[in-house]
C-alpha cells in the first residue's frame, strides 16, 4: 500500500499539543474569551443517590428515538418498566418538518403511558442547545448531517409539549438535557465520583462537572478545532452538510469514520467499487477490524487488506483523540475520576474501548472507564426527578 501511517498517526509530541490546546480553549471559554469549545449550562448537579419515583425518558439521538418508563429506586437502583425505540428516518432530513418530527416522538408515548397519566418526562436531546433553565432549550444548530427544517432557534421542549397536546396526552416535559449530560448524570448515580460523561457513537461530545460553576457543563467538544488533519478529513469536510463545523466530531464519530476510510481506500484502489458516499459504516469497519470476519463487500483480497489497515489507523486516531480530550479535562481539574461513556463506537467497534484505555494509561490515568448502555435514558429520568423536586 502506498499510503502511510503518518497520515493518521498522532505521535507523543502531537498528542501533547492537542492536550495543551484543549486546556487553553477550555480556560479561554471559562474566562469569556473566544474558543472553539462551549460551556453550555445544564442547571444540574451530580446525582445525590436520593432519586426515587416513576418517570418517562425520551432519548432523541442521531439515529433512533427511544421512549421509556423508568422507576428510580435511589442509590443507583433503577428499572426500565417499558420501552419503545424507532428509527427517526425521513424526519431527520430536509424533507421532514418540525411538526412531523415531534408528532412522531409523541406517538412513541402511546405504548408507555395512559392518556390521562401526568408523569414528568425528561428529554435527552443530543444537539447543542442554549438553556436558561432545566425546562427549556433552544436548538443552536443541527449536527450529524441532520437537517429537519423549523427546529433551529425553537424551544425544543415546547415543540414536544405541543405535540403531546395534539395527541391528547398529559405527559409533562419538565427537563431537557444533552446526551453527554445524561451520561454523566447517570454515571454519578451508578458510580459516585464520575467526572466525565462522553458519547462515542453517531456523534461525539463530552460533559464534565466544573467546580467553579458548580454545574455539569456540555462542552460541545465535537467543535474543537486544534487538531491535525489529512487530505481525507479535508475532502469529507468539504462535501459535508456543514463544512468547517465539528472538526473533532468529523475525525472521531461513527457518522464519519467509515466515510474517512472509504475516501482513503478509494485513493489506493480507485476501482474498488465503493463509489457511494457513506456506504462504509461502523458496521463494515467492525467486520474489517475483527480478525477472521468475512469482508462485508465483494472486494479482492489485496483491497480487503488495505481496508483492514486503514480501518485500524482511522479507529486508533478516533479513540486517541477522544481520550486526549479526557486527559486535558483531568489536567484542568487537577484530579481524575471515573469516566462514563455511551455510544455504538465505544460499545461495538472491536478494540475501541481498549484503545481509549491505553491512551489514558499512556498519559498516566489508570481509571475506571465504564460503558453506560442506556445512560441517556437513565440520565433523562434523573433530570426529570431533579426538575420535579425543584417544581414542588
Ligand atoms: C452534538 C452533541 C451531542 C453529540 C453526541 C453532536 O453532534 O452536537 O450535542 O452530544 O453529537 O450525540
Image (tube, helix red, strand yellow):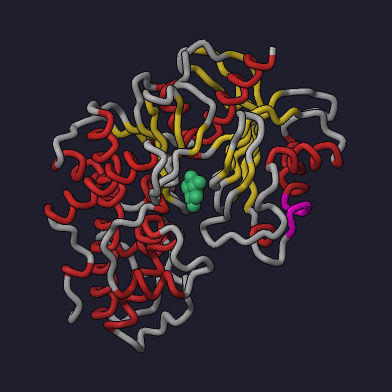
- 293 over 128 or under it: above or below: below
> Residue at 46% of width from left, 52% of height from top?
203
State the image quarter where residue 43 is shown: top right
| Residue 228 x/y as whole percent | 26, 62
Residue 353 visible from this viewpoint:
no
Residue 197, given in percent of the width and then of the height, sits at 40, 35
Residue drawn at point x = 42 percent, y = 57 percent = 254
- Establish if 274 lies above or below 110: below
Q: Is residue 11 magenta?
A: no
Pick out the residue farthest to the bottom. 271
Q: Nearer the viewer, residue 88 or 224?
A: 224
Q: Nearer the viewer, residue 73 or 209?
A: 209
In the image, 340: left or right of 109? Answer: left
Q: In the picture, which quadrant includes the N terminus?
A: bottom left
Q: Left or right: 47 with respect to 120?
A: left
Give whichever of 60, 33 is nearer the camera. Answer: 33
Q: From what the image shows, is residue 191 above or below residue 143?
A: above
Quadrant of residue 113 within the rendered picture: top right
Q: Which residues are magenta?
A: 97-101
Q: Which image quadrant is residue 329 in?
A: top left
- Residue 153: percent from the left, percent from the top? 66, 50
Q: How many marks?
A: 0
- Please tell me which residue is depicted at 48% across the width and 79% down the height of the picture: 276
Q: Main secondary structure of the magenta part?
A: helix
Q: Residue at x 23, y 73 (%)?
A: 305
Q: Quadrant of the C terminus?
A: top right
Q: Decide if residue 246 is in sight here.
A: yes
Percent across and percent down for residue 246 are 43, 58
Amino acid at each position: 500500500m502506498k499510503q502511510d501511517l503518518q497520515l493518521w498517526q498522532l505521535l507523543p509530541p502531537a498528542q501533547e499539543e492537542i492536550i495543551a490546546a484543549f486546556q487553553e480553549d477550555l480556560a479561554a471559554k471559562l474566562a469569556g474569551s473566544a474558543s472553539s469549545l462551549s460551556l453550555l449550562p445544564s442547571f444540574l448537579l451530580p446525582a445525590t443517590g436520593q432519586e426515587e419515583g416513576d418517570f418517562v425518558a425520551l432519548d432523541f439521538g442521531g439515529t433512533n428515538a427511544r421512549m421509556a418508563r423508568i422507576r428510580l429506586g435511589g442509590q443507583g437502583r433503577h428499572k426500565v418498566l417499558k420501552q419503545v425505540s424507532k428509527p427517526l428516518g425521513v424526519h431527520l432530513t430536509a424533507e421532514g418538518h418540525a411538526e412531523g418530527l415531534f408528532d412522531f416522538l409523541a406517538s412513541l408515548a402511546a405504548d408507555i403511558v395512559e392518556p390521562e397519566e401526568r408523569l414528568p418526562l425528561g428529554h435527552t436531546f443530543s444537539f447543542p442547545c442554549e438553556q436558561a433553565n432545566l425546562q427549556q432549550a433552544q436548538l443552536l444548530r443541527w449536527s450529524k448531517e441532520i437537517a429537519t427544517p423549523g427546529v433551529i432557534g425553537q424551544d425544543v421542549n415546547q415543540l414536544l409539549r405541543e405535540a403531546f397536546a395534539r395527541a391528547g396526552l398529559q405527559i409533562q416535559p419538565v427537563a431537557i438535557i444533552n446526551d453527554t449530560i445524561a451520561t454523566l448524570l447517570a454515571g454519578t448515580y451508578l458510580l459516585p465520583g464520575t467526572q466525565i460523561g462522553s458519547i462515542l457513537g453517531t456523534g461525539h461530545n463530552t460533559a464534565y462537572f466544573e467546580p467553579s460553576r458548580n454545574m455539569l457543563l456540555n462542552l460541545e467538544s465535537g467543535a474543537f478545532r486544534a487538531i491535525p488533519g489529512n487530505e481525507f478529513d479535508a475532502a469529507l469536510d468539504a462535501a459535508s452538510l456543514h463544512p468547517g463545523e465539528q472538526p473533532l466530531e468529523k475525525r472521531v464519530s461513527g457518522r464519519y469514520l467509515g466515510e474517512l476510510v472509504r475516501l482513503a481506500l478509494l485513493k489506493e484502489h480507485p476501482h474498488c467499487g465503493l463509489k457511494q458516499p457513506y456506504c462504509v459504516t461502523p458496521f463494515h469497519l467492525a467486520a474489517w477490524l475483527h480478525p477472521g470476519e468475512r469482508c462485508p463487500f465483494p472486494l479482492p483480497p489485496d483491497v480487503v487488506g488495505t481496508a483492514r489497515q486503514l480501518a485500524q489507523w482511522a479507529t486508533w486516531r478516533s479513540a486517541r483523540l477522544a481520550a486526549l480530550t479526557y486527559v486535558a479535562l483531568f489536567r484542568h481539574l487537577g484530579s481524575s475520576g471515573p469516566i462514563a461513556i455511551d455510544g455504538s463506537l465505544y460499545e461495538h467497534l472491536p478494540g475501541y474501548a481498549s484503545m481509549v484505555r491505553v491512551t489514558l494509561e499512556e498519559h498516566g490515568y489508570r481509571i475506571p472507564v465504564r460503558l453506560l448502555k442506556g445512560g441517556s435514558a437513565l440520565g433523562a429520568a434523573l433530570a426529570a426527578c431533579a426538575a420535579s423536586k425543584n417544581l414542588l
